[in-house]
Image (tube, grey):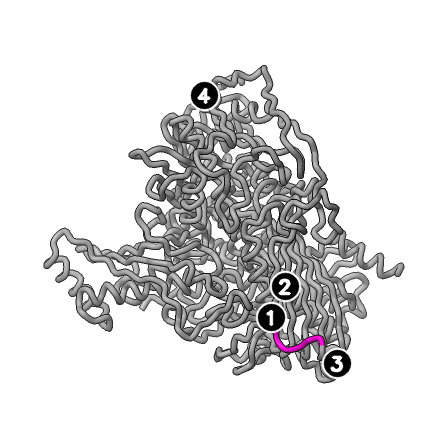
């Protein structure tokens, strides 16, 4: 496979790597940059475990060809704010931890986009992150805790 | 005191921040990547293995069954499953050959360049189908295990019973779908083969290595790495990866990483046993159970592996939480040419409890009783005996537990509202259903005596406490809760206590991390080991806190450089008795008891069923960490709802064919309602501070509660999981035309 050179910003640090042209962003992060916080759950964009922020937008890094990040900015769970992680953990967001980094990055997107956070139904919005441990209540509690907006109305108010 | 506190889990921050290193996050110098060449048919004989001449095979490490230094078996119960196919293939995707290479890309190309040529043999697809002689592969009849539980004289009672109700109940296979697939890494260290990876049972893996290599336990070191979900799927199954990776590491002399991708993991790994349960029940006019005949068949797959014990738990839960004087349970696990079905949260009980709890609703309908009335008059009361003769000695009022769950769910109001709603809405139907059930905590019968688990608690001079067990945190939080148990017993701060990573060169064998046994059985041993430690430093075990810390410090002052270790070993409680041959006695030391209530909505345009409310009320003794316990319940309920409505394993040649998250659907966040968890606490003498097992219980109740709700909403009887839209459509269409 032909090699290409990719220069991008990873968690605010510029990095350059020579990679196989058909590499996925997930491979670039995990195996070329050694940032293994991003996990592979399914390799086909279903589970969301490999979610990272690409120029601030959440993407499944298993579906992004690595060459597409040239000159762009990627954030992974390793860059998460410690206070956010504490709030998530206090809410039972993590159990086995395999889906957690993806959940953290979607949460980060919501904190950076308060208009989105205000308007969405969190239960629907978080549906791109599959979790087999928590039944999702711990995840939703955690996200709400980070967003710190206790007046939100969403589907968690229960059935009418 | 830390027991009873909802401490955040101690490993949570690192997991969330991506700093936890799972097996695939590890790279070692010179490491090879390994892959598995698998059988292409369900049953056959290997004729030839062809290697594509276009590949430079000299660059690959290749291993097959002839390379195994010891016995070609994966040690479990009967040791009938080979680690690598010799001649005979028993299931599609059975491992035949192993490859390893520096480049994962070259490895993948090479895996596709090996062809296993076979002569196919007649396979068994359906455990209920009649057997041709050429299909027999185990004993005379392909039956792995038979169990009979007898009580009273059911045959006599059926002759004059006012009511006899029959039913047939089917449950499907289920994939664990832990988010981290199976994986191990193996390497040499000081003349010893090390296997580190994702697992629940380091000592099972150690035994499997010992057998397959024909060497002593000391020749190996097994280390559990952070494990991204297990649910039983990493109980017996990872042993096969351990043998494969260790074999390649030995042959190559290099570190070898063997990590399955999602497709391979779903295709080749274990699943929940599909089940068929037949009920025939005699009742009196008031609905009192007079006699129960229950026939259970579990599809065991191609090798015995754990099927006998899965069957055992299934049979022992077949009569549920009800009292009945005349019982015959007959249970069989049978061979099919599918990948072996294995351990999965609930371990046989979800299958039989689904059948029973559906059957209770069917029976109530036949007798014109309300489902809650039929349950109330039959739930165990103090002094009643279960099917094995075990006396109900617990303090939990099971009828009151059911009533409490119904109250939380607003059951009566919902029933009234649904009646109006269903008669007016053009296409939506709402229903509410329940299940009352239990789950035995710890190993069945004499299992804990056989395990003879041991734990250690070490106190260092600086006051730090290490808890040494083989219990694997796979997300259920035992690194946190076992630390809480020790901190509580010693009266020290929980941050002074650490659960040491399971490593067979360091921790004693406290048994597998299965069977809802960790907190109750091993936790109790941890508490007792703390007592032993206190006796060593103070001559008494009724001190704690500052006094304990001072005594520990004084001991170290008097024994410079010495190791202070408290120990405990499982001892059978004298009052418990189990007769394995007769299947009589105390099947479990104690049980978790529960009543679940599900509310659903069916869309008759799409046949999609959604859970819209879920109440999970259980009595699980003292909850060591209520937040972690609630997380266990919520996750189990979600998995149960998945099994009830979404998760359909499609078989092709006996093996799963929908091996992707795209076509094997588990519930996502938007599919589920908030899961409302409530605990009742009746401290048990068998666990630390009264704790009982939790992990499996929430898997048992959701499926019957959900399907009961669907049946109530649509006034139908469907008796199967998963109740996918396609199946519900077929049922309704058939009913329309029937």
Whole-Å distance between the Cαs marked 1 and 2?
8 Å
**Mark 4 crowd level (few <14, some 14–19, many ≥20, 10 Å Cα):** few
Nearer the observer: mark 4 or 1; the answer is 1
Whether residue B122 is visible here, answered yes or no, is: yes
Q: Residue B253's quadrant in the figure?
A: top left
Q: Disc 1 to disc 3, how far (Cα)?
A: 21 Å
Same chain for labels 2 and 3? Say yes or no: yes
Q: Earlier in the sequence, mark 2 or mark 3?
A: 3
Residue located beneath label 1 in the image: B320
Q: Could you tell me residue B428's position as x and y percent?
A: 76, 62
Looking at the rendered structure, which numbered label has been put on residue A18?
4
Nearest to viewer (mark 4 / mark 2) = 2
Location of residue B627 by image quarter = bottom left
Report the residue marked by disc 2: B352
Asked if the stretch drawn in magenta spans residue B172, the answer is no
Instruction: Determine whether label 1 and label 2 are within 8 Å by CB.
Output: yes
Q: Where is mark 3, residue-wise?
A: B161
Mark 4–mark 1 Cα distance, whole angstroms, equals 61 Å
Q: CA distance from mark 2 to mark 3?
A: 24 Å
């Amino acid at each position: 496979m032909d090699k290409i050179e990719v220069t991008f910003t990873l968690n605010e640090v510029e990095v350059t790597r020579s990679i196989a042209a058909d590499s996925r962003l997930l491979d670039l992060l995990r195996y070329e940059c050694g940032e293994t916080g991003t996990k592979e759950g399914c390799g086909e964009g279903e589970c969301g475990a490999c979610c990272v922020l690409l120029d601030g937008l959440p993407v499944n890094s298993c579906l992004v060809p690595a060459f597409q990040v040239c000159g762009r900015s990627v954030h992974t769970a390793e860059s998460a704010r410690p206070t956010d992680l504490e709030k998530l953990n206090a809410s039972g967001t993590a159990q086995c931890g395999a889906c957690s980094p993806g959940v953290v990055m979607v949460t980060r997107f919501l904190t950076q986009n308060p208009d989105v956070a205000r308007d969405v139904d969190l239960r629907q919005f978080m549906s791109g992150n599959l979790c087999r441990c928590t039944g999702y209540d711990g995840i939703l509690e955690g996200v709400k805790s980070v967003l710190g907006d206790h007046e939100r109305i969403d589907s968690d108010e229960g059935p009418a | 005191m830390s027991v009873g506190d909802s401490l955040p889990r101690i490993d949570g921050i690192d997991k969330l921040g991506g700093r936890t290193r799972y097996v695939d996050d590890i790279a070692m110098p010179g490491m090879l990547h390994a892959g598995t060449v698998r059988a292409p048919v369900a049953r056959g004989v290997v004729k030839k293995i062809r290697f594509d001449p276009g590949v430079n095979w000299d660059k690959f490490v290749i291993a097959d069954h002839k390379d195994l230094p010891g016995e070609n078996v994966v040690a479990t119960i009967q040791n009938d499953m080979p680690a690598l196919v010799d001649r005979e293939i028993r299931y599609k995707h059975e491992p035949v050959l192993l490859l390893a290479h520096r480049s994962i890309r070259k490895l993948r190309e090479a895996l596709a360049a090996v062809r296993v040529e076979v002569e196919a043999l007649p396979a068994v697809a359906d455990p209920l189908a009649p057997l041709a002689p050429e299909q027999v592969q185990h004993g005379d009849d392909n039956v792995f295990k038979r169990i009979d539980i007898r009580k009273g004289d059911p045959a006599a009672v059926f002759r004059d019973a006012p009511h006899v109700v029959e039913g047939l109940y089917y449950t499907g296979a289920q994939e664990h779908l832990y988010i981290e697939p199976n994986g191990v890494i193996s390497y040499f260290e000081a003349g010893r083969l090390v296997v580190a990876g994702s697992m629940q049972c380091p000592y099972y893996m150690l035994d499997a290595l010992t057998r397959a290599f024909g060497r002593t336990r000391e020749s190996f070191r097994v280390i559990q790495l952070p494990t991204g979900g297990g649910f039983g799927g990493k109980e017996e199954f990872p042993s096969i990866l351990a043998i494969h990776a260790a074999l390649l590491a030995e042959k190559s002399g290099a570190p070898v990483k063997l990590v399955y991708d999602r497709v391979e993991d779903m295709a080749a790994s274990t699943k929940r046993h599909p089940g068929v349960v037949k009920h025939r029940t005699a009742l009196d006019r008031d609905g009192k159970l007079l006699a129960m005949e229950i026939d259970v068949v579990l599809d065991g797959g191609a090798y015995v592996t754990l099927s006998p014990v899965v069957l055992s738990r299934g049979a022992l839960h077949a009569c549920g939480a009800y009292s009945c004087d005349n019982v015959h349970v007959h249970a069989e696990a049978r061979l099919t040419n599918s990948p072996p079905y294995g351990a999965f949260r609930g371990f046989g009980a979800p299958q039989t409890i689904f059948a029973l709890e559906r059957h209770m609703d069917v029976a109530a309908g036949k007798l014109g009783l309300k489902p809650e009335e039929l349950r109330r008059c039959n739930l165990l009361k103090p002094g009643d005996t279960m099917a094995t003769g075990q006396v109900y000695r617990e303090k939990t009022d099971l009828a009151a537990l059911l009533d409490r769950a119904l109250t939380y769910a607003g059951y009566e109001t919902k029933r009234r509202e649904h009646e109006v709603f269903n008669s007016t809405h053009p296409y939506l139907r709402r229903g509410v259903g329940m299940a009352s059930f239990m789950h035995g905590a710890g190993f069945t019968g004499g299992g804990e005596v056989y395990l003879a688990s041991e734990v250690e608690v070490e106190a260092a001079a600086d006051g730090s406490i290490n808890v040494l067990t083989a219990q694997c945190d796979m997300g259920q939080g035992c690194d946190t809760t076992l630390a809480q148990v020790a901190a509580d017993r010693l009266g020290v701060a929980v941050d002074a206590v650490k659960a040491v990573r399971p490593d067979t060169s360091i921790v004693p064998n406290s048994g597998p991390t299965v069977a809802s046994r960790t907190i109750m059985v091993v936790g109790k041993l941890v508490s007792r080991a703390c007592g032993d430690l206190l006796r060593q430093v103070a001559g008494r075990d009724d001190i704690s806190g500052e006094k304990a810390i001072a005594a520990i410090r004084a001991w170290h002052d008097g024994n410079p450089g010495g190791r202070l270790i408290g120990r405990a070993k499982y001892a059978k409680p004298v009052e418990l008795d189990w007769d394995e041959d007769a299947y009589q006695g105390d099947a479990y030391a104690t049980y978790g008891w529960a009543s679940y209530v599900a509310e659903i909505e069916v869309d008759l345009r799409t046949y999609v069923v959604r859970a819209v409310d879920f109440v999970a009320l259980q009595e699980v003794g003292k909850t060591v960490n209520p937040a972690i316990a609630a997380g266990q319940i919520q996750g189990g309920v979600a998995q149960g709802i998945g099994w009830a409505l979404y998760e359909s394993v499609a078989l092709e040649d006996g093996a799963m064919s929908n091996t992707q998250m795209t076509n094997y659907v588990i519930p996502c966040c938007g599919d589920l309602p908030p899961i409302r968890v409530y605990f009742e606490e009746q401290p048990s003498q068998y666990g630390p501070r009264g704790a009982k097992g939790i992990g499996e219980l929430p898997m048992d109740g959701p499926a019957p509660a959900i399907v009961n709700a669907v049946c109530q909403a649509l006034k139908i009887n469907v008796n199967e999981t998963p109740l996918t839209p396609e199946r519900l459509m077929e049922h309704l269409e058939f009913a329309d035309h029937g």
